[in-house]
Amino acid sequence: MAKTILAVDDSGSLRQMVAFSLQAAGYEVVQAVDGNDGLSKARSKVVDLVLTDQNMPGMDGLTLIQSLRALETYRKVPILMLTTESGDEMKARGRAAGANGWLVKPFDPKRLIEVVQKVIG
Amino acid sequence: MQQLQDMENDLARTGSLLDEAVNRLAGSFTAIHQLVNEQQAEMDALLTQYPLLHQRAHAIREMREVIGDEVHAVVTGLQFHDLVSQLLAHATGRINELRILMAALAADGSEKPTGHIQEQLAALLAARSAEPELALDGMSEAGACRQVRQQHMRGGDVELF
């Protein structure tokens, strides 16, 4: 059974490219348009990996990660940030919030797939 | 003030055109990629059915790899839309900041701006000239002024904690 990835980003084109890349590698992709939508979708179906942007209207990525880590079902699910932010301070905040990795946009599809395969197989 | 409004309108129009262009590009790219995949499947079937064509198999495999690399380059490139949209939002936010400041100056009526407001404006403009990446408190709280520092469309860094 294909593993499922939740892709959270307020940019439709970015979500489309993430979905395109990961579906080509055999993953199922659920898309969410912002942090609140992401949290709602994560609650309705437990996924194998969460890939989230940071800067989104409403609930941002760090808050989404903290909210997910507060759920029993998401204590161990890998969460990766995919964001334009590249500073060490932000990365440290992401790690403290519970992120397992940090990818800086734009992503290279080959590298994205490699990282995802490394994290969830 | 009218000039600011015109600038804001231009930015909004730029954003709309960008959205439309990228949606068309992404749609066509997805369709082409699907057709290429189907074409490759047909070639695989032909190679199986006609073993003599195996001499062409190497060339076909090489083409498949090149297509794969180009597809990845397109996917990386199309992400410019997200980055540019953020930059446009930042520019619009800064125009809004300027409008608020100018409205505050104008609110004093036909008299010259007070020294206090003039000092505030001068300090603000000086600060932004020295450190353009410094976001104003109000905007940073709204999350609208995060800097997009990317200068090129190469794949970004990856770090697993």
Image (spheres, coloured by chain):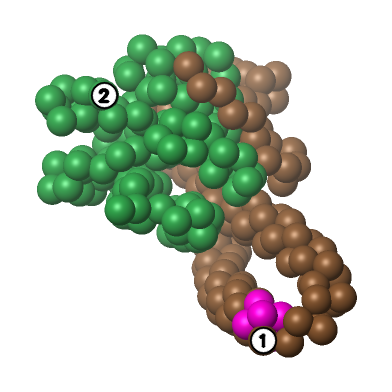
Chain colours: A green, B brown
Does residue B104 sit above or below B72 in this rendering? above
The residue lying at 61 percent from left, 40 percent from top is: A111
Does residue A78 sit above or below B85 in this rendering? above
Report the chain holding disc 2.
Answer: A
The residue lying at 26 percent from left, 43 percent from top is: A47
Q: In the image, B109: left or right of B32?
A: left
Image location of residue B156, percent across then percent down = 65, 35
* Residues in magenta, as a range: B43-48
Q: In the image, A119: left or right of A5?
A: right
Residue nearer the viewer, A89 or B92: A89
Q: How many angstroms separate mark 1 from mark 2 (CA)? A: 48 Å
The residue lying at 64 percent from left, 29 percent from top is: B157
Q: In the image, B109: left or right of B33?
A: left
Tell me the crowding category of disc 2: few under 14, some 14 to 19, or many 20 or more residues within 10 angstroms, Cα based: some
Residue named by callout 1 = B49
Does residue A65 sit above or below B34 in this rendering? above
The residue lying at 57 percent from left, 33 percent from top is: A104
Residue type at numbered disc 2: Lys
* Marks 1 and 2 on same chain: no
Residue named by callout 2 = A76
Image location of residue B48, percent across then percent down = 66, 80
In magenta stretch: residue B44? yes
Name which quarter of the figure residue A76 lies in.
Answer: top left
